[in-house]
Amino acid sequence: MRVVVDTNIAFSAILNTNSRIAGILLGPSRNLNFYATGHLLSELEEHREKLMKLSGYSVAEMDMVTQLVISRIRLIDVRLIPKKQYAKAFDLTHDIDVDDTEFVALAEHAKAMFWSGDRRLVNGLRKKGWTRCITTDELFKRVTDTGRNPKKSSGD
């Protein structure tokens, strides 16, 4: 399954490498392919000091954990997303959280699920009829259900 990772998911994985989020992102592949735009990197850099303060990481630890998380995510240049899909994403996000437009556009373009921990965003997108959102609990259930039921994962 293709999964576009929202910045808050990457933040959570960095802050707690033993969390369910980190387990999904950093664990065995389970046929999950993670994607984001370069916006993820700029947001990580913008909030680096806050992440270090919250986590208690040294500079070296922060670099190591951030690199580990980023290494699991394929970064896609936003310029590869067709303008039509970007415009649709803007229509979906402009009144909820415009900062997530690129991620929603990438999910549309890649025919991927958009993994976010932002309940307001997920609920707002779903109210607009956009069904590509997935929460951590939903993704965890899919991952663990697939692991228990070989019929679901055959052919992947």
Image (tube, rainbow, N blue to C red):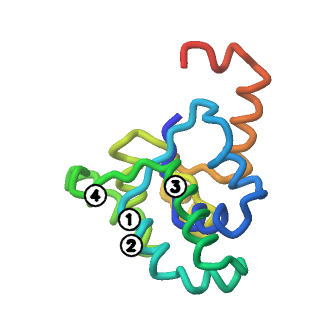
Q: Is residue 109 left or right of residue 83?
A: right
Dots 2 and 1: beta carbons under 8 Å? Answer: yes
- Does dot 2 land on a helix, a strand or a loop? loop
Give neighbour class at mark 3: few <14, some 14-19, many 20+ (Cα, 10 Å): many
Q: Quadrant of residue 62?
A: bottom right
Q: Position of residue 102 (x, y in %)?
A: 36, 62
Q: Is residue 154 above or below residue 88?
A: above
Label 3: which secondary element: strand
How far separated are the C-alphas under marks 3 and 2?
Answer: 19 Å
Q: Nearer the viewer, residue 136 or 108?
A: 136
Q: Amino acid at mark 3?
A: Val
Query: Which numbered disc, 1 or 4, marks the residue closer to the eye?
Result: 4
N-terminal-most mark, 1 or 4: 4
Residue at horizontal 40%, vertical 73%? 42
The residue that mark 3 highlights is 5
Residue at image position (71%, 27%) is: 146
Q: Which residue is mark 1?
A: 101
How far from the left and from the top, in percent, is residue 93? Answer: 42, 67
Where does label 2 land, which residue? 94
Instruction: Name the spot of residue 61 as percent of width and height, x first.
Output: 64, 70
The amino acid sitting under disc 1 is Thr
User: Is the residue under label 1 in contact with that under label 3 (CB below 8 Å)?
Assistant: no
Q: Is residue 123 visible?
A: no
- What secondary structure is marked by label 4? helix
- Location of mark 4 (residue): 78
Alpha carbon distance from label 2 to label 4: 17 Å
Given this view, does label 2 or label 1 mark the residue nearer the observer?
A: 1
Q: Is residue 118 above or below residue 133?
A: below
Q: Residues within 10 Å of mark 4 (few under 14, many from 20)?
A: some
Q: Which mark is residue 56?
A: none
